[in-house]
Image (spheres, rainbow, N blue to C red):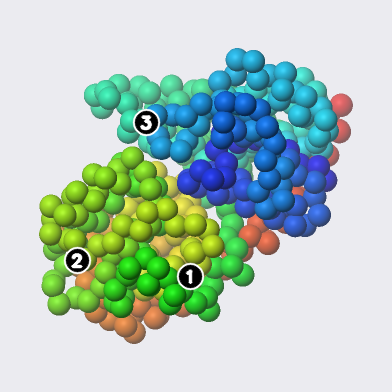
């Protein structure tokens, strides 16, 4: 099968949609399919690059100043280049990851060229409106406009998936008439596993020899790492643990200053960007994972942590309760309940037996998200889209 994947974010961008896209491309290719990716280039020129031996046609793009590392490819003067890539690759099916810019153009061209097209929704307006310097009611208007623009593109697709049932329910509110299939982003359970060795990373990242509470991800407003830092000040001093923060983003400098202001310098280490090759070991070095993001349609890093055998403390928001079963493989806290969060951190690091029990439950819950099972399901969806397209023509 020849599969063309279109996305507005791709490796080395640090976000869930980027990770899903390059992992999907890699595992499809590993199963013998021919795969091509269309995404913004890293420069102001068109060009082909390779990641994991998968070719990606980069559409000329420009940096977005308010969002470090993210690039945007305006539609002006790009349609001809994108059309040539599609015609030359001649895909059996197209799988798009967004309704913005490049992907919107790809949808129009797919319809014009009669190519079946499916889409996965990673979109939540909350991930974008944080950056609007506007009152709350203006942000609500912006969210509604965002969903309307989403619908205009996705209603043209043959099939739509999204990572969780929660995400499917949210997506239905956009007014889409199609059935929306909940289908996990998947996790590589051979790569992320409890048996990984991460001891050597303690020295590399200057981490103390203490139980580690780990966060991995973007350091942006909606991730609420500041709430975690504030809660740490309420955890009794005799609870032995260290908070490791892996990632970069617009909030990094602010969070470092906040940590210093709160007197947490000895309790917190900001690791910066952690390369892919270190992530499995970093999870295995840790004792518990924490996530406070309020716009998670699934949360790949939480699944990586669970596959590594970690219990998870997470905010009770959006789709996180589908992964974190309160009292079983971790705890769920209310976003503004700093005392409650501090209590769960204290309980997690004061009870080794509980932590081990929750570790086993994390492995049990995440097993159904094994990427090898998920790729098979996407293959079935592609085959269905192709069959339906042939039947209708």
Picture quadrant where residue 234 is located:
bottom left
- x%, y% of residue 185? 57, 52
> What is the CA distance from the residue labelled 2 to the residue labelled 3?
30 Å
Residue 153 location, x and y as percent? Answer: 60, 25
Comparing 231 with 243, the one in front is: 243
Q: Is residue 326 visible?
A: no
Answer with mark 1 or mark 3, whichever residue precedes in sequence. 3
Q: Residue at x 61, y 70 (%)?
A: 190
Q: Is residue 317 above or below residue 290?
A: above
Q: Left or right: where does residue 232 sit relative to residue 100?
A: left
* Disc 2 + disc 3, Cβ < 8 Å: no
Residue beneath the point at 60% across and 33% down = 41
Q: Position of residue 30 (x, y in %)?
A: 75, 57
User: In terms of depth relative to the viewer, which is nearer, 391 or 264?
Assistant: 264
**Residue at the extreme bottom of the image, as rendered:** 353
Residue 240 lies, with reference to residue 377, above or below; the image says below
Nearer to me, 301 or 42 = 42
Label 3 sits on residue: 66
Residue beneath disc 1: 281
- Image location (x, y in percent) of residue 154: 60, 29
Q: Is residue 259 left or right of 272 when viewed as pictured?
A: left
For mark 1, does the 10 Å Cα neighbourhood hold few (<14), some (14 to 19), or many (20 or more) residues?
A: many
Q: Is residue 245 left or right of residue 162?
A: left
């Amino acid at each position: 099968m020849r599969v063309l994947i279109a996305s507005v974010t791709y490796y080395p961008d640090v976000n869930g949609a980027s990770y899903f896209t390059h992992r999907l491309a890699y595992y499809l290719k590993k199963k013998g399919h021919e795969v091509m990716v269309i995404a913004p280039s890293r420069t102001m020129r068109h060009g082909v690059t390779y990641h994991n031996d998968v070719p990606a046609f980069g559409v000329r793009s420009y940096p977005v100043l308010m969002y470090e590392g993210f690039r945007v490819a305006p539609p002006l003067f790009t349609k001809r280049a994108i059309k040539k890539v599609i015609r030359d690759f001649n895909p059996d099916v197209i799988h798009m990851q967004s309704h913005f810019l490049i992907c919107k153009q790809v949808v129009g061209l797919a319809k014009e060229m009669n190519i079946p097209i499916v889409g996965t929704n990673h979109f939540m307006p909350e991930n974008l409106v944080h950056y609007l310097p506007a009152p709350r009611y203006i942000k609500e208007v912006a969210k509604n406009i965002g969903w309307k623009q989403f619908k205009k593109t996705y209603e043209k697709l043959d099939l739509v998936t999204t990572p969780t049932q929660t995400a499917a329910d949210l997506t239905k509110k956009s007014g889409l008439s199609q059935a929306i299939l909940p289908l996990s982003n998947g996790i590589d359970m051979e790569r992320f596993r409890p048996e990984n060795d991460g001891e050597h990373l303690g020295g590399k990242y200057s981490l103390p020899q203490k139980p580690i509470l780990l966060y991995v991800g973007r350091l942006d407003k909606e991730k609420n790492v500041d709430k975690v830092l504030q809660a740490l000040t309420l955890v009794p001093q005799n609870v032995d643990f260290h908070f490791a923060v892996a990632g970069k983003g617009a909030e990094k400098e602010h969070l470092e200053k906040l940590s210093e202001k709160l007197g947490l310098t000895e309790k917190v280490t900001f690791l910066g960007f952690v390369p892919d090759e270190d992530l499995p070991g970093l999870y295995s070095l840790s004792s518990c994972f924490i996530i406070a993001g309020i716009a998670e349609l699934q949360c790949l890093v939480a699944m990586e942590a669970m596959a590594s055998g970690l219990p998870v403390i997470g905010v009770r928001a959006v789709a996180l309760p589908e992964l974190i079963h309160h009292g079983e493989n971790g705890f769920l806290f209310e976003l503004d309940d700093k005392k409650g969060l501090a209590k769960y951190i204290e309980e997690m690091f004061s009870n080794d037996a509980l932590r081990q029990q929750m570790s086993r439950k994390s492995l049990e819950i995440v097993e159904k998200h094994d990427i090898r099972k998920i790729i098979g399901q996407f293959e079935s969806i592609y085959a269905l889209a192709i069959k339906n397209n042939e039947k209708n023509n």
